[in-house]
Image (tube, rainbow, N blue to C red):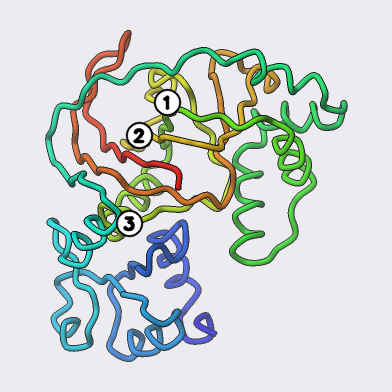
Amino acid sequence: MVSRVFSPSYMKKLAADNPQGLVNGYIKVPGISKARFSFLSKVLPPGTKIAIPKETPWAAKKGALVMSPEGSVSQATAAQAVGVKGTITTGKTLAPFHSAPELSPDHIAWAHKLTTTQKEAIRDWKSEAKSIRHSVSDNALKGTELSFEATGFLAAIKKAPDYAGTLYRGINNKDYAEAILKQCVVAGIGGTWKDYAPMGMSRHPSLSHSFSHGGLMLQVRVKTAKPIEPSDGLTHEAEIIGQPGKEYRIQAIHQQATIHIAGVKPSIKNVIELEEI
């Protein structure tokens, strides 16, 4: 319905600004006319708040959520409601990041029970991760059919035991990194963020740091992630997969923070602290 009114280029921009879809009742839109805003506000779920650039002069008259760098009252209320005491900081020096402990024997032995096809599906992740993520995300958001590789990978990781602990993810693509950061700022501390696709994370912050060319690192406390090392053939990456569709509580957002990791030169990154719900 929306696509009949908005051009393909506008929809592409909207999707880029909101890579995980509607989160915590908020959606961020680029510059928009009154007519388009009125239509969009009617087709989104009831109660949705639409965040638009604060330079848009007519926004307040329409009841839109106009964001500022400090966030909003509704975000602070949400954080208090769920007991989150984190903040949005700028220029902070964070406590050093440390690697998670080695996997237990149970977190490794499960892979021996996989069929040959399932083992191949796990190994495919190292070369097909991006396409698998896109396939799973499109399936959830657009109802498209899962690819053969995605179907096999999801079936295989379901057999893995749950892993709980602190993991790290570095975002390589700058546009995607900026979109996630913007989305989490809109959702606010105490709000939620969801990844509809399998999310690759590492026990080693140094490894995740090497992937964070987009300037963003996620520090994630997981409860039901799935370990795929060493079955993926990339033992050095110590990779563990966040299950698709999981929601994460936003605990803190650190913009332009100085981070310290053993063996890595101190650097400045945006960091978002998340906890699986």
Residue type highlighted by circle 3:
Gly
65 or 17, nearer to the observer: 65
Q: In percent of the image, x 38 and y 60: which residue is there?
A: 17
> Which residue is denoted by mark 1 in the rendering?
208
User: Left or right: 5 with respect to 59?
Assistant: right
User: Left or right: 70 with respect to 15?
Assistant: left
Compared to residue 11, the image places residue 205 above or below, namely above
Residue type highlighted by circle 1:
Ser
228 or 216, nearer to the observer: 228
First of labels 1, 2 by sequence position:
1
Asked whether the residues under the numbered discs 1 and 2 touch, taking CB atoms below 8 Å apart as contact, a structural biologist would say yes
**What's the mark number on residue 147?**
none
> Which residue is denoted by mark 3 in the rendering?
191
Tell me the SS state at disc 3: loop
Compared to residue 241, the image places residue 229 above or below, namely above
Tell me the SS state at disc 1: helix
> Which residue is denoted by mark 2 in the rendering?
217
